[in-house]
Image (tube, rainbow, N blue to C red):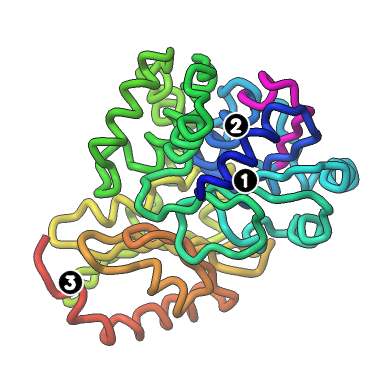
Amino acid sequence: MKKEQISALKKRIDIPEKVVIVPHKGPDGDAIGSTLALYHFLKQKKHEVQLIAPNDFPDFLKWMAGSDEILIYENEQEKCDQHIQEATLIYTLDFNLLSRTGEMQTSLENAPADFVMIDHHQAPGDYAKYLYSDVNICSTCQMVYHFFEMIEATENITPAIADCLYTGIMTDTGSFKYPSTTSETHRVIADLIDKGANNSLIHQSVYDSSSFNKLQLLGTALNNLQILPEYNTAFITLTQEELDKNNFQKGDTEGFVNYGLSIKGIVFAAIFIENKQEALVKISFRSKGSFDVNQFARKHFDGGGHINAAGARSLANLASTLSEFKALLPKYKNQLDYEV
């Protein structure tokens, strides 16, 4: 973020105003953690703050302080639209294109407010007056911590804020195992623990709170796992019938794609999840090394994200989507043909 933007935003933070904070559709730990952390901070500063998520988020994130204050746009559209129209400043966190908010997009595009973007994904849009974009930082939660540094507000980090930031950094780094985890990330984490983040309880709340149905669904996913050894690729499929049979709840498939990537020799992993209600197939890609799944997702499946982690979708049915995916792999054989 440019110095003049930091200075201008710091002045605005010192004067209470009506603020809306928005994560992306299908919010994950980084999205919810970063928005809640900012929410608590701005409430300290006496702002009138409303946090609006495009749709609901997983139960394993609802233990965080303030999560019950989040309005869900798809459930209370009229009320949310009113907040958006009355806001003078809108923060968008963990995404950089308004299209990532689904049905909220039109309302946000018509909002009279100034926008602040804090995000670490590639190719940011141009809608924000105040822009903090850095693809080299592992998570938006780490960026929010650095944002607090920029405006000289790290002393305002309470245990509740520390919990939220820790959660987002932990989940977006795969518990600190991804290459995006740097020594600076660990220094931030150390300070968050010093400021009250309960690291052990956070891990338990996120990773050790699975339902029986989720574990049964994981068993189905692993049973569906296929390997294409000639391309060092593994993929998982889940049909709508399989989701329904196991009483699928939002967030239940979080992390499933990583099981494919955990197999020795696999460089590229994917999961394809049928969603008949939305008439599409949701896709997650993961990779090791230099294979860029962000570019793969952007080019072929209307998606994007990071070099080693990206999301996408297909409007074709599951069988056609799989056929297209397999047909693309020979074009990338040279990039996938190395040992890890």
Q: Position of residue 114 (x, y in %)?
A: 74, 50
Residue underneath mark 3: 229
Residue at 63%, 39% (x, y): give it.
9
Q: Which mark is residue 23?
A: 1
Instruction: Using the image, determine if residue 224 lies above or below residue 231.
Output: above
In the image, the segment drawn in magenta is 41-52
| Residue 179 belongs to magenta span | no
Q: Amino acid at mark 3?
A: Pro
Q: Amino acid at mark 2?
A: Leu
Relative placement, left or right, of 87 versus 102 is right
Q: Judge depth for marks 1 and 2 and give the one in front.
A: 2
Q: Position of residue 286 (x, y in %)?
A: 33, 59
Instruction: Using the image, determine if residue 318 lies above or below residue 224.
Output: below
Q: Quadrant of residue 203?
A: top left
Number of marks drawn: 3
Q: Position of residue 267 (x, y in %)?
A: 21, 64
Residue at 82%, 46% (x, y): give it.
84
Relative placement, left or right, of 234 versus 266 is right
Q: Judge depth for marks 2 and 3 and give the one in front.
A: 2
Q: Judge depth for marks 1 and 3 and give the one in front.
A: 1
Label 1 or label 2, whichever comes before in sequence order: 1
Q: Which mark is residue 38?
A: 2
